[in-house]
Image (cartoon, grey):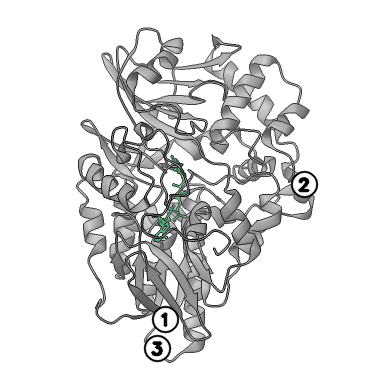
Amino acid sequence: MNSSPPRRRGAADPVAPAATATTPELGAGTPDPSRRRFFKTAAATAAATALPLAAHAAASAPRSAPGDAHYDVAVIGGGFAGVTAARELAQRGAKVVLLEARNRLGGRTFYSNFGDKKVELGGTWIHYSQPHVWAEVMRYGMKIAESPGVAHPERVLWMSAGKVLEIPVMENWALLEDALKRFHADTGKVFARPFVPGLPAAGRALDHLSIADRMAQIEMSPAQRDLMNAMMATNCHGRIDTAAYTEMLRWWSLVDGDAARLLYSCARYKLKDGTAALIERMAEDGGFETRLATAVAEVRQSATGVTLVTEEEQRIDARYAVVSVPVNTAGMIEFSPPLHSAKQAMAKEHHAGKGHKLYLKVKGRLETLLFFAPETELFTMVFTEQPGADGGVLVAFGPPAGGKVDLNDPKVVEPFIRKFLPHLTVEQVLGYDWALDPYSQGTWCTYRPKQFGAYLDDLRAREGRLFFAGADIATGWRGFIDGAIESGLQVGQAVAVELRREGGGRSA
Ligand SMILES: Cc1cc2nc3c(=O)[nH]c(=O)nc-3n(C[C@H](O)[C@H](O)[C@H](O)COP(=O)(O)OP(=O)(O)OC[C@H]3O[C@@H](n4cnc5c(N)ncnc54)[C@H](O)[C@@H]3O)c2cc1C
């Protein structure tokens, strides 16, 4: 947006990748502030770490004649929102081109190799109570796997006042459930219907509260407080004093106030063949043209159409555009005329999700377990992905590291793991720092206090021939894969209606 000038070739990156060792794609210890070079390096590393990108190669094959540069719709961004919108429109007969800055589809989902295994470095878990993504699972016959550390943990441990505590699983659960119920006492009055767009009036009075503010209003034992701190810091994937209480109220409403469903919705069921398999099926089904490694730098609109200019100075003309980039990155595109002030403000402020997620290969007996620690620690939630008598795999979530800690160094993370399980050795670690990636600049979306009430309606609003999509502006499971698909479906439908109304083309 025009408030923050677009950074063309060689310009400074909006996020300073200070400690690059935390981001394997940046290469070992070689700071590189340029987006272009980031992705050259990323491409090289992706060749080593990502799946044989059959999915993405297939998706990148043009599905309509690339020589004909005038499209019905240009979609900016190839995450789940953009791919859904592109598929919906192409299936209705529109001529669609999807432009994606990275060398792959999937955006904040990234199915990669980790030793001899495959892991999800970004969005992973889905649930049957998430209607949009589950419909895609059923439609394409995708297979589901479970994460054992959440599905059926043998032990639950947590750290409080620097000590590791353990009580029977059900007692631990009761302690957490009690705190969650009291913390979310306002849910009923605010979010009786979580899929209704916008923040209801009752929510506006609470929207200034951070999660930390709300926690301070609740009576809890010190141990219970540390357990809640861990859970909330994981849920918002940021610092609890930077994330809005209303976001957690919304989640609680989406799970009907059921603590087990909250945990299961976030971390139990995943796609057996990875998110890449699903997005590949969706893209193939769409039959639209995809251009990878094509970052859009400018969007100009007139009364009759939209012109996009890429970083490589390519020009693409379309009747409409769907902008499905993360809200944290929208400031990197120059819009003419400028976008609504709310969109510009959000692009400057960013949402609060800036945490990290890592996989750890450990040596030593690994049970099926789940453990928590407050946000003052390196990780807030860790659980077993693969148990084993001689070792296995853990997945860990932690608060923003700010690029200051080398989270891909086993020696850095091992002391934390050993506080819980002193017999384990950490052999290998893999994470991806989404906060340093210029095309995400954050992880899943959690609004800061006041952003929900102040911005959401305007973030979602169409502007002339531009439509906006994305998990970050969804109504229901905002911040989730489900929200991305929800939003892509709605925007795909809205643009199709416009094309039909306008007529005069082959589309929709
Ligand atoms: C670590 C992590 C864990 C998560 N865990 C879960 C989970 O377990 N379950 C769940 O449901 N969700 C999870 N999420 C959230 C979920 O992955 C996202 O909300 C969702 O995938 C976002 O989809 P999207 O299409 O809205 O945005 P994105 O996936 O971010 O797609 C936007 C696309 O736009 C592209 N882009 C940006 N700028 C430009 C430009 N100028 N030109 C062209 N392209 C551009 C980006 O490269 C990107 O591909 C997680 C996210 C992260 C990061």
Is 500 on the left or on the right of 182, as rendered? Answer: left
Q: Is residue 106 visible?
A: no
For discs 3 and 2, the disc positioned in front in the rendered view: 3
Q: Which of 219 and 418 is in front in this view?
A: 418
Residue 286 placement (x, y as % from top left): 33, 68
Q: Nearer the viewer, residue 269 or 411?
A: 411
Residue 508's disc is 1
Residue 508 placement (x, y as % from top left): 42, 81
Disc 3 residue type (three-letter):
Gly
Tell me: residue 20, above or below residue 350.
above
Q: Are marks 3 and 1 in contact (CB under 8 Å)?
A: no
What residue occupies the far bottom of the structure in this picture?
504
Residue displayed at 68% across by 26% down: 179
Residue displayed at 76% across by 44% down: 206
Q: Is mark 2 on a helix, strand or loop?
A: helix
For discs 3 and 1, the disc positioned in front in the rendered view: 3
Q: Can residue 356 be seen in this view?
A: yes
Q: Which residue was labeled with disc 2?
A: 189
Disc 1 residue type (three-letter):
Ala
Count neighbours of disc 3 (C-alpha within 10 A) and say few if under 14, some if 14 to 19, many if 20 or more: some
Disc 2 residue type (three-letter):
Lys
- Between the C-alphas of marks 3 and 2, the distance is 47 Å
